[in-house]
Amino acid sequence: MKVLALGGPGAMGAVAVRTAARLPGIEEIVVADRDLDAARRLTAELRAGSCAVRAQRVDVTDSAVLHDALRDADVVLNTVGPYYRFGLPVLRAAIATGTHYLDLCDDWEPTLRMLELDSAAREAGVCAVIGMGASPGVSNLLAMAAAGALDTVEDVYTAWPVDVPRGSTEELSPEDGAHPPAALMHWMEQISGTITVVRHGRTTREPPLRPISLELPGDRRGTGYTVGHPEPVTLHRTLRPTGEAATLMIVTPGTAAFLDVLRRDIDRGELTNETASAQLLKPGLLRGIRSLIAAGRFHSPGTLPPFFAAARGRRDDRPHTTLAYLADDSGTGTPLFIDDMSRATGIPLALALSQLVDGSARRPGVHPPESVMDPDRFFRDLRPHLGLSGDGPAVIVEHLTGC
């Protein structure tokens, strides 16, 4: 199978490409980017691998060039963000050229619009899996594990860490030495305006950064803050919770307060996503003071795990809460998270590619991860990348009855 890796030289794309190059069934990887020199540097690194690699200059805003590149590929890995700008046009082009599609889309707005292309993808025989990174992606599969232990699902939450130290900051460095990175612009987009969550079993729009306090199995409790993300949109369709669904940031009060300052200034038109991203990288004095004053209004994450999914509902006709998370090999139930954003996101994308390459997940249509991925296989494949031994799943599901 021939793979077109759009945005391959980027931090997350490069991890996905390096991982995909070792997968069986991959004949060729074309590392495509508007920066041809960067694409060539990555292909030079990979030329000793088992599959053929080459570099190609592709600017996704050039429709003719994009379509030509897609026609020569069996599947495209789209890691070009932010997805609220580039997700939908690349998927449309993939459907038009009959190219299977995988991406890391972490914006809820294009997720809704891409799901609307399901019929077109089915007619074209294209399998598109959207949002297959850490969150969304791994988080969706954890949510399915948590909800699968319940008879009925009322509430479902996914959560990811904001203040966890990262092993690599390349993805948060300014692009081309000047422009803010896509990851930060996405973040500013999703903490401003209104976001989609599920309330009372229905999707609704509300401001972000709403506190949600949780009491979870293992005597874990604390507060997370809502952020715009695809998980509520897709889990609403797959799990059909009768109560609430939201994605939460596990964040310290100080960081939550600073994000709230940025949110208010974006909503007032005093900042754009780009200038707010710059403020996040290098906070200004006045906004820093405002966030210090406001920090007392925000609550601690307490003992919540850094990365998890939780579900509340009923089991055996009793209230029940479940918690699903990645765990290490110690047997102590210690939650695990890949503390490098690039690896945490790029590796799951490549592992999903392996299920598409061998045909096990190649079902025409536009799918969220939980609709098409085999979770048991995915978590087994993930184990060695987490440094775990053995061949079992890397997921622990804990239970709390009566809460």
Image: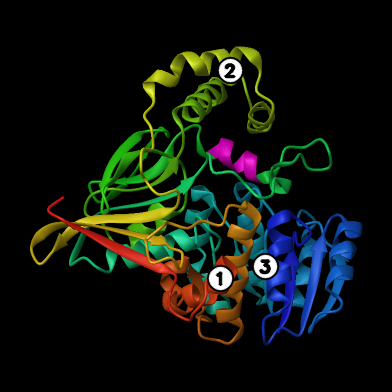
Indicate which label's residue lies in the foreground, 2 or 1. Answer: 2
Q: How many residues crowd mark 2 within 10 Å: few (<14), some (14–19), many (20+)? A: some
Residue appearing at x 36%, y 59% in the figure: 235
Label 1 sits on a secondary structure element that is strand
- Alpha carbons under labels 2 and 3: distance apart: 38 Å
Disc marking residue 128? 1
Mark 2: amino acid: Gly
User: Which sits earlier in the primary sequence, circle 2 or circle 3?
Assistant: 3
Q: How many residues crowd mark 1 within 10 Å: few (<14), some (14–19), many (20+)? A: many
User: Which sits earlier in the primary sequence, circle 2 or circle 1?
Assistant: 1
Judge left or right: residue 297 versus residue 82.
left
Q: Which residues are magenta?
A: 183-189
Considering depth in this image, is 61 or 299 the residue closer to the camera?
299
Considering depth in this image, is 231 or 400 the residue closer to the camera?
400
Q: Quadrant of residue 387?
A: bottom right
Considering depth in this image, is 8 or 115 the residue closer to the camera?
8
Label 2 sits on a secondary structure element that is helix
Residue 333: percent from the left, percent from the top? 37, 61
Judge left or right: residue 120 versus residue 72.
left
Judge left or right: residue 88 versus residue 311.
right
Residue appearing at x 72%, y 55% in the figure: 11
Disc marking residue 77? 3
Residue 238 in view here: no
Mark 1: amino acid: Ala
Residue 380: percent from the left, percent from the top? 49, 77
Kindly indicate whether the residue at mark 3 contacts the one at mark 1 (C-beta within 8 angstroms): no
Q: How many residues crowd mark 3 within 10 Å: few (<14), some (14–19), many (20+)? A: many
Q: Which residue is mark 2?
A: 288
